[in-house]
Amino acid sequence: MLFTLYIFTFRNHCCLTFCNACAHGDVSYSVAEEMKRGGAIGNIAKDLGIGTVTLSSRKARIDSQRNDKRYCDINMNTGDLIVAERIDREGLCGKKATCVLKEQLVLENPLELHRINIHVQDINDNAPQFSGESISFEITESADKGSRAKFMLTEAHDADVGTNAVQRYDLQNNAHFAVNVELDSSGRNYPELVLKKELDREKVKELKLILTAVDGGSPPKSGTAVIHVTVLDANDNAPVFTSLLRSNTFTKMRQTYTVK
């Protein structure tokens, strides 16, 4: 059996005490972020085999390893570990794959500590967002379609993690462009605009297309940006006279320079 050694100092005298309850009394729970205050995470009294009367008589309390907030408390009447403060996973752990709150149940007379690990689960409470409302390109009409005509798009950011983060990009239906998602060397997905049909400035001078980023939540959330494409002219048309103009001009020239 494992034992935890505690050292207490009173007026230059050291007292040693052993506590075997702390060594095997750790408990773990899972809780969804944004759970309402007062919501029950689990019945810690039942899980540790401690009666509610004992909780009161031994002045049970929850201590946090964080100095700013205490996210949990204990209901002395029921023995439930409850939410005391709003738990925002993104604020606590950012984009980390796992997020764990470390708390302690403290019992006095005699002193007894039980470590509590609370795994905070992500919920889909954030929608994908682009850094700007518009993404602009200038593309010459002579650009070749296919793999050589790819244009990197601004990726959307989602504060959520896992399947609740951005999962795909959709592009408004159109004749000229498609969207493709590539994986870079760091493992990050980024979207590309791919030209699938040549542009003709004489027919279309600009295009405005809606790009949508969609996450994997249920239901999914999305964010949009407008892709603004300006088609630049290429010297792809030679000057051409109409046959009527050329014929009329030649006739007039013959009339003017005929020697009588």
Image (cartoon, rainbow, N blue to C red):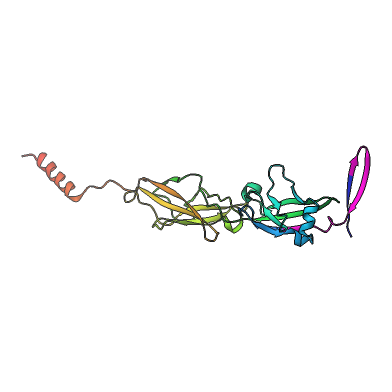
Magenta span has 23? yes
Left or right, residue 155 beside residue 228: right
For the N terminus, which image quadrant?
bottom right
Seen as rendered, the residue at the extreme right is 13
| Image location of residue 86, percent across then percent down | 62, 49
Q: Is residue 146 visible?
A: no
What quarter of the picture does the C terminus occupy?
A: top left
Q: Position of residue 37 (x, y in %)?
A: 62, 52
204 in magenta? no
Q: Residue at x 21, y 49 (%)?
A: 242
- State the extent of the magenta-drawn residues as a range: 8-28
From the viewer's side, name the closer residue of 245 and 222.
222
Q: Is residue 208 visible?
A: yes
Residue at position x 10%, y 39% from top?
256
The residue closer to the viewer here, 176 or 189, is 189
- Viewer-closest of 205 and 128: 128
Query: Exactly how many numbered labels are in the figure?
Result: 0
Q: Nearer the viewer, residue 101 or 10?
A: 10
The image quarter containing residue 51 is bottom right
Query: Where does the image place residue 179, in percent across and percent down from the top left?
Result: 48, 56
- Residue 98 lies in what quarter of the image? bottom right
Q: Residue at x 17, y 47 (%)?
A: 245
